[in-house]
Image: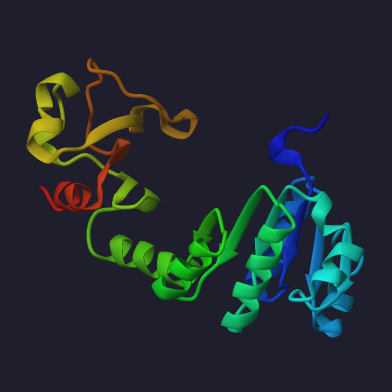
């Protein structure tokens, strides 16, 4: 039996977001059924996805004929048509899909999708904008929000925590953040991230992964 991570996925809406997601899943060995109302888009993806079909995603009977109720994971990737996005999510809920992911255009759209049955809602444009803003505004080298107001960043250590064991840096009390991993510059090209411990001593040039609330991470990244 396939693991849950390799179960088939149906992607409804094959615009830029949906097609990119579907193709990435397929490249990772996941069976994908892609559905879109635009036959030209479907024809362009034929042969690149396991299965692809032209259909109205708001047509419950069409979804049944395509075998959508047999899937446990679905992604509503419909673009600017909010009504179609919401109706499709409702249909998937009625069909008993266990895990429904849905793309939202804004916070209000996200709230509606959650209320009608989406288990996971993503705002790709907003999340990317927030990520780039964080990378441009400080010493962060990467930024990933893992939950509401909680994130992980990749950065270099400020000088006030260099050369002392992490237990003596008082990071948690001073900034409210925790260093969870470090890549040592001293190891050069062979360096890999490893778990940080209370005895870890950071050096200039090291890369660290730090977790905490967004506000605390911003304050930490601005420290010198």
Residue sitting nearer the eye, 79 or 189: 79
Q: Is residue 204 left or right of residue 98?
A: left
In the current view of this chain or complex, which residue is farthest to the top?
A: 199
Q: Is residue 99 above or below residue 201?
A: below
Q: In this view, does 110 lie to the left or right of 204?
A: right
Expressed as whole percent of the image width and height from the top left, the position of residue 111 reads 44, 67
Quarter occupied by residue 206: top left
Quarter occupied by residue 47: bottom right
Q: Is residue 24 above or below residue 164?
A: below
Tell me the residue at 38%/48% (across/down).
147
Expressed as whole percent of the image width and height from the top left, the position of residue 14 reads 73, 73
Residue sitting nearer the eye, 121 or 59: 59
Tell me the residue at 64%/66% (across/down).
89
Tell me the residue at 80%/83% (across/down).
38
Expressed as whole percent of the image width and height from the top left, the position of residue 162 reads 16, 31
Q: Is residue 157 above or below residue 187?
A: below
Tell me the residue at 29%/19% (across/down).
197
Residue sitting nearer the eye, 162 or 6: 6
In the current view of this chain or complex, which residue is farthest to the front?
A: 94
Q: In this view, does 77 lie to the left or right of 67?
A: left
Q: Is residue 37 left or right of residue 196?
A: right
């Amino acid at each position: 039996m396939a693991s849950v991570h390799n179960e088939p996925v149906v992607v409804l809406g094959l615009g830029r977001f949906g097609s990119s997601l579907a193709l990435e899943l397929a490249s990772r060995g996941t069976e994908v059924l892609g559905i879109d109302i635009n036959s030209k888009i479907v024809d362009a993806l034929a042969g690149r996805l396991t299965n692809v079909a032209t259909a109205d995603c708001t047509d419950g009977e069409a979804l049944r004929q395509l075998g959508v109720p047999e899937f446990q994971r679905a992604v509503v990737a419909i673009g600017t048509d909010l009504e179609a996005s919401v109706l499709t999510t409702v249909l998937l809920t009625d069909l008993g899909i266990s895990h429904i992911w849905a793309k939202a255009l804004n916070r209000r759209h996200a709230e509606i999708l959650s209320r009608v049955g989406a288990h996971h809602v993503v705002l790709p444009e907003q999340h990317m904008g927030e990520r780039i803003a964080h990378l441009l505004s400080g010493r962060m080298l990467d930024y990933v929000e893992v939950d509401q107001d909680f994130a992980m960043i990749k950065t270099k250590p400020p000088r006030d925590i260099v050369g002392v064991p992490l237990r003596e840096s008082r990071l948690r009390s001073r900034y409210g953040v925790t260093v969870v991993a470090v890549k040592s510059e001293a190891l050069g090209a062979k360096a890999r991230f490893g778990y940080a411990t209370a005895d870890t001593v950071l050096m200039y040039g090291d890369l660290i992964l730090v977790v905490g609330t967004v506000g605390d991470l911003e304050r930490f990244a601005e420290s010198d």
